[in-house]
Image (spheres, helix red, strand yellow):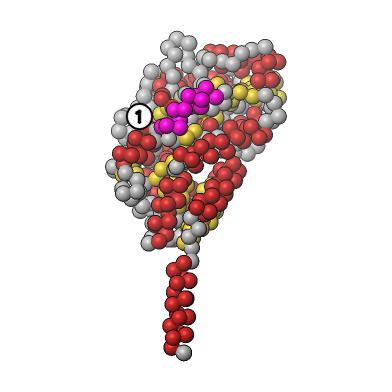
């Protein structure tokens, strides 16, 4: 009997030790990202039968708050997908674990990944890594351009002229927009990281601690952008209902041009029923200065991952940042690989859709955010004082600089 009990106990222990480790993974609900991740999880589990991944997704608008509320409660995921601009807050809260140096050597990270990834390095440590990166470009409706007998713009002057040829109706009763203006979409990034630089300015000090855009360049950038609506009447914000108004209106064939990120490629590809194309962001005719905004989402390991879970999380993160996964992400989501090697592929640079985004990597600026949501609000509120309340662009840029500096001072105090 004793032998039988001992054998049974041994079998029970062996069975328990053989039970797979289950990791919870969180990301926001974006159709192509979720479906691609489901496929990747199946692939990872097949190669690692001792690890199971449970993916949970949440609406974008509620996602940051959902993650933030899980921190004090000691709940939430083991591996989490975050916008890079949120990292300072999550690192300060102790929510994220530094990546183990033996598994993710800093020198190798900086040799293998595109330079913009270094904006997520905090106090000399990496807490997260991306699968992909993004830049901005102009999506345009080729059918509307053909009907108007115009060619894709290379300069901002041509951009305005093209929009004027395409727009139909008068505010507020437009039927077709020349440009899908949307300050809280990607447009506020265009003002801050593209237009200010193209007018010869710098939005921030080198250490990121000071807002330096309440200048002549900043005033010109704010005026140029708001003039697209107030002076040239190329469009209005929120032409369609919903958070992705500008993109949804473009997909419906009601907008000639929008500025959007590479992450929108597959959404537009699957929804648009017309011929469309992608071109680089315009430059000004008199100086030709190129600039772009680069951003990315990252995956990190939370403090919930301990013991076997931490080992499993390291394996999963290595898988998510592998070149093979990055290729899959490019094909199915449409985001640029974070790998220097893959992003430098000549075929990708010549691609009629991806080329404009990849070609912008060398001059893309990744803002050193400390509170992305608060900093975004400062800019959008300032822009809207011009568009909705008739404020002067110079006053608006001063307001944005003052409000954002308060946020920076609060973080760096």
| Screen quadrant of the C terminus | top left
Answer above or below: position of 151 versus 179.
above
Residue beneath the point at 56% across and 15% down: 153
Report whether 219 appears left or right of 157.
left
Crowd class of label 1 (few under 14; some 14 to 19; many from 20; radius 10 Å): some
Indicate the quadrant where residue 73 lies: bottom left
Asked if residue 346 lies in the magenta stretch, the reply is yes
Residue beneath the point at 29% across and 43% down: 123
Counting labels gives: 1
Residue placed under numbered mark 1 in the picture: 204
Q: Nearer the viewer, residue 176 or 321?
A: 321
Asked if residue 69 can be seen in this view, the reply is: no
Asked if residue 365 can be seen in this view, the reply is: yes
Q: Nearer the viewer, residue 364 or 162?
A: 364
> Which residue is farthest top?
286
Residue beneath the point at 54% across and 47% down: 40
Indicate the quadrant where residue 180 lies: top right
Asked if residue 287 lies in the magenta stretch, the reply is no
Q: Nearer the viewer, residue 363 or 213?
A: 363
Residue 281: x, y in percent?
A: 51, 21
Q: Which residues are magenta?
A: 340-351
Q: Secondary structure at mark 1?
A: loop
Residue 295: x, y in percent?
A: 45, 35
Report whether 208 appears left or right of 72.
left
Magenta portion: prevailing SS class: helix
Residue 210: x, y in percent?
A: 32, 32
Residue 31: x, y in percent?
A: 60, 43
Answer above or below: position of 309 versus 298.
below
Residue beneath the point at 36% across and 52% down: 97
């Amino acid at each position: 009997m004793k032998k039988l009990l001992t054998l049974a106990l041994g079998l029970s222990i062996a069975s328990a030790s053989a039970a797979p480790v289950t990791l919870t993974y969180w990301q926001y609900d974006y159709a192509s990202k979720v479906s691609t991740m489901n496929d990747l999880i199946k692939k990872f589990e097949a190669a690692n039968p001792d690890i199971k991944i449970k993916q949970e997704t949440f609406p974008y608008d509620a996602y940051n708050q959902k993650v933030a509320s899980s921190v004090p409660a000691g709940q939430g995921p083991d591996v989490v997908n975050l916008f890079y601009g949120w990292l300072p807050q999550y690192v300060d809260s102790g929510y994220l674990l530094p990546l183990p140096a033996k598994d993710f050597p800093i020198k190798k990270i900086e040799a293998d990944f595109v330079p913009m990834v270094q904006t997520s390095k905090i106090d000399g440590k990496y807490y997260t890594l991306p699968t992909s990166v993004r830049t901005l470009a102009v999506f345009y409706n080729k059918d509307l351009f053909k009907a108007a007998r115009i060619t894709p713009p290379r300069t901002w002057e041509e951009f305005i002229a093209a929009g004027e040829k395409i727009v139909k109706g008068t505010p507020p009763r437009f039927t077709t927009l020349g440009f899908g203006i949307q300050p809280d979409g990607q447009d506020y990034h265009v003002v801050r990281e593209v237009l200010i630089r193209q007018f010869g300015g710098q939005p921030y000090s080198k250490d990121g601690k000071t807002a330096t855009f309440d200048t002549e360049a900043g005033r010109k950038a704010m005026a140029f952008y708001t003039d697209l609506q107030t002076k040239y009447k190329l469009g209005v914000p929120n032409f369609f209902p919903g958070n992705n108004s500008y993109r949804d209106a473009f997909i419906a064939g009601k907008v000639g041009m929008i500025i959007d990120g590479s992450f929108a490629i597959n959404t537009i590809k699957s929804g648009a029923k017309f011929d469309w194309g992608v071109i680089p962001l315009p430059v000004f005719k008199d100086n030709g200065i190129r600039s772009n905004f680069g951003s990315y989402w990252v995956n990190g390991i939370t403090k919930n991952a301990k013991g076997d879970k931490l080992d499993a999380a390291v394996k999963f993160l290595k898988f998510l940042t592998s070149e093979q996964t990055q290729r899959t992400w490019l094909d199915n989501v449409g985001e640029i690989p974070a790998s220097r090697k893959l992003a430098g592929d000549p075929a990708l640079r010549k691609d009629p859709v991806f080329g404009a985004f990849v070609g912008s990597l060398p001059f893309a600026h990744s803002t050193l955010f400390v509170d992305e949501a608060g900093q975004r609000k400062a800019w959008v509120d300032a822009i809207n004082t011009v568009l909705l309340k008739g404020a002067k662009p110079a006053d608006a840029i001063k307001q944005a600089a003052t409000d954002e500096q308060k946020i920076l001072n609060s973080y760096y105090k």
